[in-house]
């Protein structure tokens, strides 16, 4: 599941606490509370799709794209050219 800092949801106009609660646990045992919301993502080359995203209720250091996102897109890296590409999943 994709997890983003709650401030991103707030800046999109989402009432963060209206979402269903989901808790995540890190490998060191810390628990993070989040709220689930449906968002529509759009990219000119990929089109648009709806995705349920978890927005944290406390600050997090990194936003994470989950398998829910990667089931819809394919990402490739060309290290020798320092480039990457994103395409719609066939």
Image (cartoon, rainbow, N blue to C red):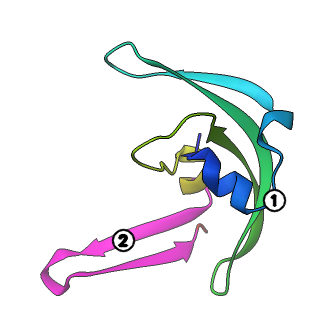
Residue 68 spot, x, y in % from top left: 62, 47
- Residue 12 among magenta residues: no
Q: x, y (%) of residue 4?
A: 57, 48
Task: Reply above or below: 14 against 85.
Answer: above
Q: Measuring 41% from the left and 17% from the top, which residue is drawn there?
A: 30
Q: Is residue 72 above or below residue 43?
A: above
Magenta part, dominant SS: strand
Residue 13 got which mark?
Answer: 1
- Distance in Å between CA atoms under marks 1 and 2: 32 Å
Vertically, is 41 above or below 81?
Answer: above
Q: Residue at x 59, y 39 (%)?
A: 1
Q: Quadrant of residue 75?
A: bottom left
Q: Which mark is residue 76?
A: 2
Q: Nearer the viewer, residue 58 or 25?
A: 58
- Looking at the image, which residue is at 41% across and 79% down? 85
Give how far across and how far down residue 78 sits, in percent: 24, 78
Q: Which residues are magenta?
A: 71-88
Residue at (62% x, 51% y) in the render: 7
Q: Report helix, strand or loop for mark 2.
A: strand
């Amino acid at each position: 599941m994709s997890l983003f800092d709650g401030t991103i949801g707030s800046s999109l106009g989402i009432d963060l606490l209206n979402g269903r609660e989901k808790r995540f646990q890190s490998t060191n045992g810390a628990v993070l509370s989040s709220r689930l919301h449906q968002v529509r993502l759009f990219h000119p080359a990929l089109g648009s799709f709806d995705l349920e995203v978890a927005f944290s209720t406390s600050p997090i250091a990194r936003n994470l794209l989950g398998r829910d996102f990667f089931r819809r897109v394919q990402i490739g890296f060309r290290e020798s050219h320092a480039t990457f590409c994103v395409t719609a999943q066939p």
